[in-house]
Image (cartoon, helix red, strand yellow):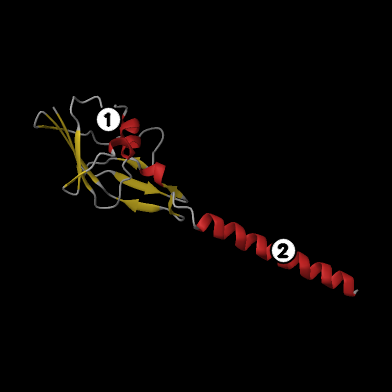
């Protein structure tokens, strides 16, 4: 009986320790931005030779409702994710993929500002709530 209790105790300790260890590994993952979803709204404005390009309504909405999409409140991009959200999910390039456009296809000499500051991450930029992103092309 004593042996069964010892084995049972060891099994419980190993199980609890394994769960704790697994959670501690994933908790430190710098690529995870949220574990239970997020609802953010960055703004994107595009200019080609000084002229504003209109981003269409309902990008990412159709037969499949993508978590990154637009509505009629442009220039906002809606980031509405449930569950675990990774940095790669929020890249600006993913919005252009959803739109069916090439971020570099609007013209030459692309420049980007985020919240008024120059930024060269372009399609790799990870958007955040309240960002004001401007793309300028010549």
Q: Residue at x 80, y 68 (%)?
A: 8
Q: SS of the residue at dot 2?
A: helix
2 displayed left or right of 44: right
Q: Quadrant of residue 47?
A: top left
Res 94 visible: yes
Q: Quadrant of residue 1?
A: bottom right
Measuring from the top left, give residue 122's x and y in whole percent: 27, 37
Res 61 visible: no
The residue under label 1 is: 103
Between 68 and 13, the one nearer to me in the picture: 13
Q: SS of the residue at dot 1?
A: loop
Measuring from the top left, give residue 34's x and y in whole percent: 42, 54
Q: Would you call the spot at circle 2 few (<14 residues within 10 Å), some (14-19), or many (20 or more)?
A: few
The residue under label 2 is: 14
Residue 83 lies, with reference to residue 63, above or below; the image says below
Between 108 and 19, the one nearer to me in the picture: 108
């Amino acid at each position: 009986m004593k042996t069964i209790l010892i084995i049972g105790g060891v099994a419980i300790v190993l199980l609890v320790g394994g769960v704790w260890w697994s959670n501690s590994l994933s908790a430190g993952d710098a690529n995870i931005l949220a574990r239970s979803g997020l609802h953010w709204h960055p703004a994107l404005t595009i200019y080609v030779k000084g002229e504003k390009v209109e981003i269409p309504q309902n990008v990412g909405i159709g037969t499949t409702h993508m978590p990154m999409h637009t509505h009629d409140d442009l220039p906002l991009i809606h980031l509405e994710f449930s569950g675990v959200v990774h940095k790669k999910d929020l890249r600006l390039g993913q919005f252009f993929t959803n739109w069916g456009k090439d971020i570099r296809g609007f013209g030459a000499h692309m420049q980007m500002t985020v919240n008024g500051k120059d930024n060269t991450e372009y399609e790799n930029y990870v958007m955040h709530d309240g960002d004001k992103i401007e793309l300028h092309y010549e």
